[in-house]
Image (cartoon, grey):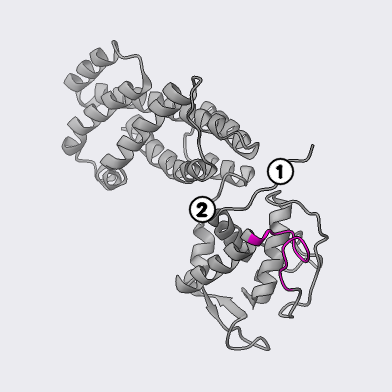
Amino acid sequence: MEAETRDLSSIEIRNLMLNTLAYEEADIDSEGKTFKMYGYQGTQLDLYRLMEGLAVKRELIKERISLSGAAWGGSGLMLHPHSTTNFSRSDIQNIFEQFHLLLNQGIIAPGAVGNYGQSLPSFHVTEYGLTCLEEQEVLPYDVDGYLEKIRSIPSISEWVEFYIKEALLCYNANCMEAAVIMLGLSSEKIIDEQIDALLGYLSRNFTNEFLHMQTALSSIRFASDKFNCYKEYFNRIKNNVSNQKFKDMLPLVDRVAFQVYTNFTRITRNELAHPSDTKMERIEVLMIFISFVKYCHTQYAFIDYYINH
């Protein structure tokens, strides 16, 4: 039985729009056209047509209506849900909203050089927008892209990568609770690696704290308690470390991030891992995935520092 279709979220539409503007391959348009080929300018219908091709390629929407080509900068087909496009009515409204948000944020601007015109529907990507295209977030439906971001993190362990990959597969199978549990396991593994690395660092630089932390950990069982122990000894030494690299990393760590991931691990292991009424909405899980890459970057930056000092 074919899976039920769903409307795309605002975050997914925005990301799809940015991905389309940045896309360089020739496989989402019948004639291989991309915005890069045309100097990152075109019309709204050029954008919407290529967005649909990319959405189908990434299996965000089903191709029930054959994708159509059009001359670049031409009028093309108007968007009629499930008639001229595979996007739903909600998706189309969302596309219009996200397009104007990109305008308001200065990522794109009305008008394009040449025979396009000086106002909408013609537009171009601004210099600021080109920078945004390079630094955009990778969402979990792009499994390869997300894993590429994860693998770019120095020293990330195979187990962490494995759990994240399983989380991505669960997410794309619409198993939200299972996805969060896998991320919870990944987070627990990172905590274990942080603790081991910090203990090694303390043994070389802060002998008393090393002995006290080692004793404290010997009676701790749960991951959230281990993380609290890590946080305690991190806070004890952070102001006594003179290394500038370490000081430069401190702004990356804040109390909110500490608390979020302590609670995150506790929730995933103590609630979702046992039969309960806990349900995770897709948008909630999406936000966790978005923040998790940055979280991994931050934690492994400290792990690498501990190991090498």
9 to 191, vertically: above or below: below
**Residue 168 sits in quarter:** top right
Dividing the picture into quarters, in which one does residue 47 lie?
bottom right
Type of the residue with mark 1? Glu
Q: Is residue 56 above or below residue 72?
A: above
Magenta residue check for 86: yes
Residue that label 1 marks: 4
Q: Is residue 248 left or right of residue 193?
A: left
Q: Specify which label sits upstream in the sequence, 1 or 2.
A: 1
Drawn side of residue 122 relative to residue 69, left or right = left
Q: Residues within 10 Å of mark 2 (few under 14, many from 20)?
A: some
Drawn side of residue 141 relative to residue 52, left or right: left
> At 54% across and 39% down in the image, what residue appears?
151
- Compared with 42, 278 (above or below) is above
Residue 64 % position (x, y): 81, 54
Q: Main secondary structure of the magenta part?
A: loop
Q: Residue at x 69, y 50 (%)?
A: 58
Q: Secondary structure at mark 2?
A: loop
- The three-letter amino acid code for the residue at tag 2 is Glu
How far apart are the alpha carbons under marks 1 and 2? 27 Å
Q: Which residue is mark 2?
A: 137
How many marks can you see?
A: 2
Residue sitting nearer the eye, 271 or 183: 271
The answer to whether mark 1 and mark 2 are in CB contact below 8 A is no
Comparing 298 with 271, the one in front is 271
Q: Which residues are magenta?
A: 78-89
Quadrant holding the N terminus = top right
Residue 79 part of the magenta-drawn span: yes
**At 51% from the left edge and 69% from the top edge, which residue is drawn?**
102
